Structure formats: structure tokens, C-alpha cells
Amino acid sequence: MPELPEVETIKRTLEARIKGLSVVSAEIFLPKLIRMPGLDEFKTLLTGRKFQGLDRRGKYLLLHLSQGLVMVIHLRMTGRLVYLPASCEVAPHTHLIINLDDGCQLRYSDIRRFGNVSLVPAADLNKLPGLCSLGREPFDLEFTRGYLLKQLHSRRVILKTLLLDQSFIAGLGNIYADEVLFRARIYPQQRSNALTQRQVARLFHAIRDVLSEGIKNRGTTLRDYVDGEGMAGNYQNLLKVHNRENQPCAICSTNIVRLRISGRSTYFCPYCQRM
DNA sequence: AAGCGGTCCTGTGTGC
DNA sequence: TGCACACAGGACCGCT
């Protein structure tokens, strides 16, 4: 599932391909994919616009078009956005095809149909639900140890749950949250207000280090994720705890344990991350 | 007010 | 071998 490192990798690979290209036409095969505006308006607005640059905010991909229009895409669980020659066979579950003026296409496919696409003027970005309520970017200067400490101590939430809260910090999902907690050596069910200064410091660095490594390794492909060129990531080979139930911890050889925290699988080392 | 659970959705894995 | 069902989870929404 695309989290910050995956969306960042898609952003980088796609930007190299589509920047400067214009939209010839768009075909929509799943109406509910388009959150706003209406389908006809979506096609009309998009046609003729040029891709001027790409951005990422949390797990959202922002494609900036000419005349101040922005296409906002959230891939959720199984969404894929791939640049391909028009002659390539269309993959199953392809819900949107954007024809480009170089003879290639930008295709959105999504097995579970959870993802969504919006097209809005840049000035209205802060009105988009979800996007407008995102918390700080982990690599922003404004994301500091002080901010983290203040947020953690102002609430009494299970830490894993808080790491997944996009209005607290933007971009962490289930995979990287587990890896971050392992790196920081913190028990996932620890209450946020009970963290020591030392633990908060470790957490702060773990968030940035794990996400950086994820990006460096072009994301994690457990099942569906590919980048803008259809390539799988490599970070799945470097995961320390996520999806590794009953396998030995690389540090202490204790078997990794799986827990359920607010409806999600959570993997951790019961020795390295003891309370 | 915070937090829980339902909802969306389909491929995969498991058990009988 | 084939069927039925639980499970996977990101974000939103409604309820407590």
C-alpha cells in the first residue's frame, strides 16, 4: 500500500516522464473514482492542459497542470499510476486513462477501487477533505522534536494508532509505522503521554531515518505497489518486523509477534520493544 | 472530545 | 476439487 516513500517514488519517476507533456484526452471507466468535479467537466478541464510539475503531500500525489489546475490522487490500498506507451496492453482494473501528446498514456488502475482522483484549482486545495487536514510533513523544518513531544504529551493515545493518524503526521502507514517503532525500540501499545524525552528523541529520528531508507530503496512492494514506470520497490527485503510474524528478530533473535491494534496488524519484537 | 467500529472493495489464503 | 468465508487496510463518517 503506497505510503510516503512509495508516493514519493511515484512522484519522482512520473515527473521525469510527464513534465511538459499535454493532455490530449481522458477516458474514465469507473465514475466513482473521480471525486470532483463531474465526469464531463473533469474531461473538459483536463484536455489541453500541460503537466508542469508534481508534488507529494502525505500520501497524496499532486499533479500541477497549466492555468493553476491540480489533479490530486490518493492511491489508498491498491492504486497504481503508471506511464506507458499507448500500445501496451491495458491491465485489468484500469479505471482511468489519460492520453498524452507524446503518444503515451498515464493509467490509473486499482483492484480494490478505494483510491480517488480530484481536479481542482490550486486555490481550492485547502478545501479538499483529507488533504486539508493533514498534519506536518516528516521532512519539513516545522516537524521538530518539540512538536512531536507536544503532540504526544497532549493526548493519551496508543502510540501506533497516533502514528497512523494523518492529521498528526502525514505519510506514515501500517508498514512504516511498525518499522519506525522497532527502530525507536518502543512498545506499540505504549500510551503517547507516557513516552520519555529519550523515547521521543528516538522516535523523531526513527521516523526520518526509516522513511529516508524507504525512499532510497524505492518503496516497499509486498503485493501491489509499483512506481510510475511499473517497477517494484526493494524495501520489502529490508523490513525488520512488518509482515514477519514468527520470524527471528535481526537484533536479538526473539520471534516477531503480531498484535491487533485498532483493527490493524501490528508487528513488533517483544524483547527489543519491551515496555 | 477522543476513539471505536462500520463502510468501501476484491484477491488471496484457509479450512472443511 | 470446490466451496464458503475470513482477512487485508486508508480514510471518512457516525455513534458513543
Image (cartoon, coloured by chain):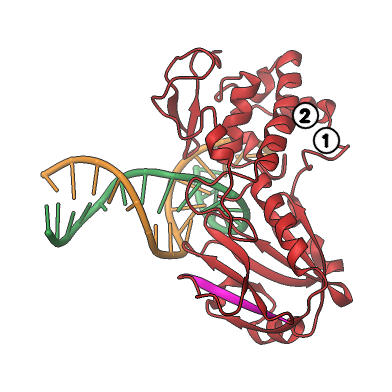
Chain colours: A red, B orange, C green
Q: Is residue A66 above or below residue A9?
A: below
A34 or A14, nearer to the observer: A14
Task: Describe residue A193's horizontal placement relative to residue A124 as left or right.
Answer: left
| Residue type pointed to by label 2 | Leu
The residue to which callout 1 is attached is A143
* Extent of the magenta region: A93-100
In the image, which disc is placed on residue A89?
Answer: none
Q: Callout 2 environment at 10 Å: few (<14), some (14 to 19), or many (20+)?
A: some
Q: Secondary structure at mark 2?
A: helix
The image quarter in which residue B3 lies: top right
Instruction: Examine the rendering and report whether any part of residue A204 can be seen.
Output: yes
The residue to which callout 2 is attached is A148
Q: Secondary structure at mark 1?
A: loop
A58 or A47, nearer to the observer: A47
For image coordinates 84% across by 40% down, the residue present is A140
Task: Describe residue A163's horizontal placement relative to residue A135 as left or right.
Answer: left
| Residue type pointed to by label 1 | Phe
Q: Position of residue B10 (x, y in %)?
A: 39, 64
For image coordinates 53% across by 47% down, the residue present is A221
